[in-house]
Image (cartoon, grey):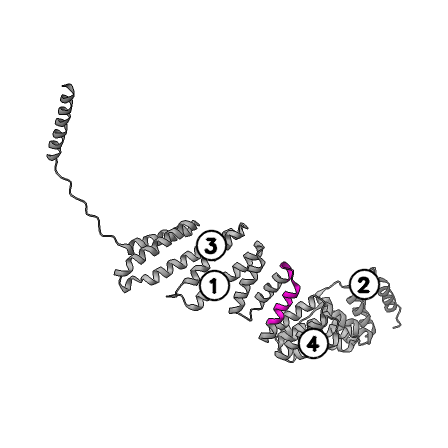
């Protein structure tokens, strides 16, 4: 009996509540605006940019991916002005840029495996991208930069064959890229330690392409290894293919390194005939003069050193000429070149003695005395200076 009363009471409460509710005014129904995926996509893209600038690359990528989904959702009803394809391309490029930034951070932290993963993810995006606003050339340049980054990072990670593979991908696009050829050679030669393969790789390329830069590089590598016979062969092939200033310089330098002074001068004179810029002409004249010095042809040495000094003064070369002309008793030239040497090194004892002696021979005793007094106590030249000063003092009127 008590139980039934409890149930009845409960029922009454519910009814009372229902009655009370029925007397409360109804709240107006809120009607949500229709879903606008384009606006949501733009909002996601903005969030992505904010996260990227804050260095939160994972969150940026998530936002850019969300934006792509929303732009794709909007595509069936979007108009031409909505630029859906352009925006999707932009988001994909943003994701690739974010992956690159992640890779760079990992590389700086020397987490090379992680860096490789991020670079490869960026490369996947570029490989799958159908250009809309980006040009094919720009897209190709992005890929080549990634190939280079992947080559370097794989090398640092110890994945040397992968490094070579990525360098080959660059060379397939840029066969005349001497820098990449050199990097590939170094990985094969220094990291994989397969000298034969390294040289054969470069040799095959040089022979197939007939590229002068490859000939010069191969010649230089042979020279570094002391194989002057092969180095000469490829330098001469470069010269026959492209007899220009760069080839002349490389070959002349090789001949100097191998003490073939006459051959070096033969090439340098051909270089001078190309009328290079004054700065390069200056270097050539100095080298020719030095080569003639090594050949004990001092007259020719003096000729080309004078040509060099006509372009730019140099104390050491001027002193060498003063010494040469002292030996041939050409006192005026001794004075001229010793004076030039002293402009660059005012206390040079060698130059002061040479000029003091020349002044003495020219009977310009006051000028001679001034120079010689400066070196009277010089450890090397003091005795000679004193003897000349005494000769001046004891000369007959």
List x then y, in percent, for residue 44: 34, 52
Query: Which SS does the magenta portion mostly show?
Result: helix
List x then y, in percent, for residue 395: 88, 71
Q: Is residue 274 magenta?
A: no
Query: CA–CA distance between discs 1 and 3?
Result: 15 Å
Disc 1: which residue: 143
The circle drawn on residue 318 is: none
Q: Is residue 195 magenta?
A: yes
SS of the residue under disc 2: helix
Which quadrant of the figure contains the C terminus? bottom right
Disc 2: which residue: 373
Tags 2 and 1 touching, CB below 8 Å: no
Residue at image coords 58%, 58% = 160
SS of the residue under disc 1: helix
The circle drawn on residue 307 is: 4
Disc 3: which residue: 101
List x then y, in percent, for residue 326: 81, 73
Question: Foreground residue, 279 or 66?
Answer: 66
Mark 1 Cα-neighbour bin, 10 Å: few <14, some 14–19, many ≥20: many
């Amino acid at each position: 009996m008590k139980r039934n009363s409890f149930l009845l009471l409960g029922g009454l409460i519910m009814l009372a509540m229902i009655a009370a509710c029925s007397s409360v005014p109804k709240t107006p129904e809120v009607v949500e605006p229709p879903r606008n995926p384009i606006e949501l996509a733009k909002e996601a893209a903005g969030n992505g940019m904010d996260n990227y600038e804050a260095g939160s690359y994972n969150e940026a990528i998530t936002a850019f991916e969300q934006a792509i989904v929303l732009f794709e959702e909007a595509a069936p009803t979007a108009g031409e002005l909505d630029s859906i394809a352009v925006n999707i391309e932009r988001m994909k490029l943003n994701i690739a840029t974010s992956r690159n930034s992640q890779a760079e951070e990992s590389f700086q932290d020397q987490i090379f495996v992680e860096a490789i993963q991020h670079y490869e993810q960026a490369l996947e995006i570029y490989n799958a991208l159908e250009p809309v606003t980006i040009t094919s050339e720009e897209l190709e340049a992005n890929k080549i930069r990634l190939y280079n980054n992947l080559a370097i990072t794989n090398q640092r990670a110890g994945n040397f064959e992968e490094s070579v593979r990525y360098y080959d991908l660059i060379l397939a696009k840029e066969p005349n890229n001497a820098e990449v050829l050199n990097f590939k050679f170094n990985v094969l030669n220094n990291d994989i330690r397969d000298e034969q393969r390294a040289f054969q790789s470069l040799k095959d390329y040089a022979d197939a392409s007939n590229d002068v830069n490859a000939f010069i590089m191969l010649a230089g590598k042979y020279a570094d290894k002391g194989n002057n016979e092969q180095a000469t062969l490829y330098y001469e092939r470069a010269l026959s293919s492209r007899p220009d200033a760069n080839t002349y310089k490389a070959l002349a330098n090789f001949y100097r390194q191998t003490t073939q002074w006459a051959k070096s001068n033969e090439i340098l004179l051909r270089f001078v005939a190309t009328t290079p810029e004054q700065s390069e002409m200056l270097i050539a004249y100095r080298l020719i003069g030095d080569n003639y010095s090594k050949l004990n042809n001092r007259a020719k040495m003096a000729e080309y050193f004078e040509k060099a000094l006509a372009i730019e003064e140099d104390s050491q070369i001027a002193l060498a000429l003063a010494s040469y002309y002292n030996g041939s008793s050409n006192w005026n030239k001794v004075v001229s070149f010793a004076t030039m040497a002293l402009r660059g090194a005012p206390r040079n004892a060698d130059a002061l003695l040479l000029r003091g002696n020349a002044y003495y021979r020219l009977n310009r005793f006051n000028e001679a005395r001034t120079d010689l007094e400066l070196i009277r106590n010089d450890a090397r030249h003091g005795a000679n200076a004193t003897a000349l000063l005494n000769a001046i003092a004891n000369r007959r009127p």
